[in-house]
Image (cartoon, rainbow, N blue to C red):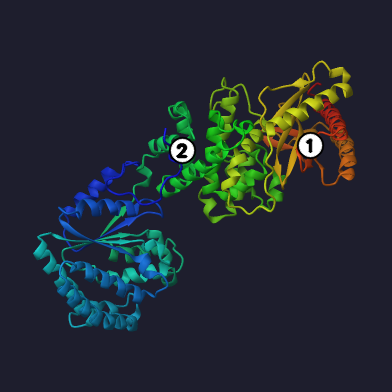
Amino acid sequence: MSRTYSLSDIPCRAEDKDEFGINPFAKGLERFITNTGTPITIALQGEWGSGKTSLMNYLQESLCNDSGSYHGVWINTWEYALMKDPATTLMQIITQMAAQTASNDSARKKDVLDKVKKFGAVALKTAVNAGLGGGSEELNALFDSPKSSIGKLRDELQQSINTTLAESGRKGFIFFIDDLDRINPPTAVELLELLKNIFTLDKCVFVLAIDYDVVVKGLKPKFGELTDQNEREFRSFFDKIIQVPFSMPVNNYRIDSFLKESLFNIGWVTPTQRDTKLLMERITEAARLTVGHNPRSLKRLLNNLSLIKCINDAQDNQEKDFLQDNLSVYLSFALVSMQIAYPKVYNVLSKYPCFTTWNEDIAFQLNLKPLDDETRQGLKTMPEFDEEWEQLLYRLCASDYYLQHKALNISQLLNSMRITIKNVLHPQSKENEGGPFNETPEQIEGNIRSAMRMSAITNLEANDAAPVNYHTSSFLKEVRDRLIVSLKKALPQYASLIAPNSARVQTNAPITLTPKVELNLHTYSDRGKIRLNLEMNISGHCTHPQYETVMQYIEELQKMDLFKKTDEAYEKTVLKYSQQRTECFESRSLMKGAYTYCSNHYLRLQFGILFPTTEDFMGRQVIADMTEMVCAMLTARQEMDEILGNGS
């Protein structure tokens, strides 16, 4: 089957397939123009990439074709405005309009252009002296006066239009004014104010591609920042120029069918996955919460995904486990979508992938402002921000103007990712009802790390150290097998129990140590080296939501002295290796590993090892060091069980 590896960003033509379901809106606008009185100005409003040019293409090709009722004139204002002042830009636009209105008669065209140049130069000089773009009464009077050079200029255009229409038998002209929102906003506003006086030509329809937000930005030098008090002034300026606003119906675009077919065409999903309703619903939801319904943003997303898929397919056979299951397909899509829409959040997630354990320690590293008590209490009443990690996300978004308005979307996306991981790992659980199972932090981190493995290719963040390319599954299996042999010798009382706890290994390799204790090996590329984390959770035990932290619970038990003794003993073992190999070993103590998740409190022991190559981890001494660290972690874990009354 022939496959399309990229999507063109060229605006659609009338004959192209209606991928987003905009045809009913386009046909309605076409009918309105056909039956409207003139002169009239219509503004197609919408953000960059929302399809304004594509809609104008449709109108031009349906109303201004060989058998159409109108002559069409297309003006790309951005091309005229490049490195020119507003007066020069306007002069060139008017000249182009005049040339197009008399294009079928070379003699009349020359005559019209001569008069336009004659009157235009004087007219624009007069306009500049009266206050170009200033909206002054004097400037408006000059345009309204038939004796002024500006009035004569408009009369010449009107006469040329009338003559051409009488000869062609068509009912009018449609002027398509494109790309105003690509011009510097103050310049765009000046052009609009001058053009509005040209827009009073009989038998003419003016269709402008302009976003109201651009007008707001362009008017700030005149009115200041937009507020509730001066909003009417901004709106009045727009209303004086525009008779009919048409907002691009982006929220009505059918992105589900577009995504389904496009993802299949680039090979991101298989035929079976394309027809899996829940998977495609989750993918569509991820797009809606990130890039939204904007066609250009969606195409950029799909092109990024296509590049990632092409590079993945070019890997050797060992690397072909990427994108082989629905969870990987969904998570990778969601993360690339986040990378495009919210790069700041994506970059934080790449450093701290287990987002459900984000805590005050991470907030300190990110230099986030603390929440005041009133805000914290208010957030606890919202399901999207009632957990500790969600409140850290709120603080992260509060530090960025754009993210402030997207915090709810980002929280919903991360929660959707968490629920999807949980339901795939524990299909017995009921979505949004808690269910009998909870996903572990290791499972969340492992799946996020795995999905992020290829998305770094399209990330714009500067990185001093390139990621290490190694086969994570093979590496973890080899380290795990060597460590198990060593642990059985060091812990003979548990030798019959020590064994792999999962046949599937990607970025995590869990090992059973005792009936209640599991060690997890987790790997990823970090600062141009390979990181191996040895992790052990004291989880599922500290379910005491009446306490703010697990430390409060330990203080209530009056066992803080015992806790500190255990923590210090564990840290002593860590310090031994940290001093021996400063650049290779690092640890997170019991105190720093405390976190809250789903109103429950947990402790985590974590020991990290960092080496340039996979071979560095396989030496006998390194395996022996790991074994001693695991024994220290197990001792600390068992002592904490006694302190908390969990049983061994």
Q: Left or right: where does residue 20 sit relative to residue 373?
A: left
Q: Residue at x 9, y 65 (%)?
A: 166
Q: Is residue 516 left or right of residue 31?
A: right
Q: Tell me: residue 423, above or below residue 33.
A: above
Residue hosting label 2: 266
Residue 91 placement, left or right of 503: left
Q: CA distance from mark 1 to mark 2?
A: 37 Å
User: Which residue type does callout 2 highlight?
Assistant: Ile
Q: Secondary structure at mark 1?
A: helix
Residue 598 appears in the figure: no
Q: Position of residue 33 (x, y in %)?
A: 20, 54
**Number of numbered callouts drawn:** 2
Classify 10 Å Cα crowding around label 2: few (below 14), some (14-19), many (20 and above): many
Question: At 59% from the left edge and 28% from the top edge, which residue is drawn?
Answer: 422
Q: Secondary structure at mark 2?
A: loop
- Front in this rendered view, residue 53 or 415: 53
Q: Which residue is mark 1?
A: 615
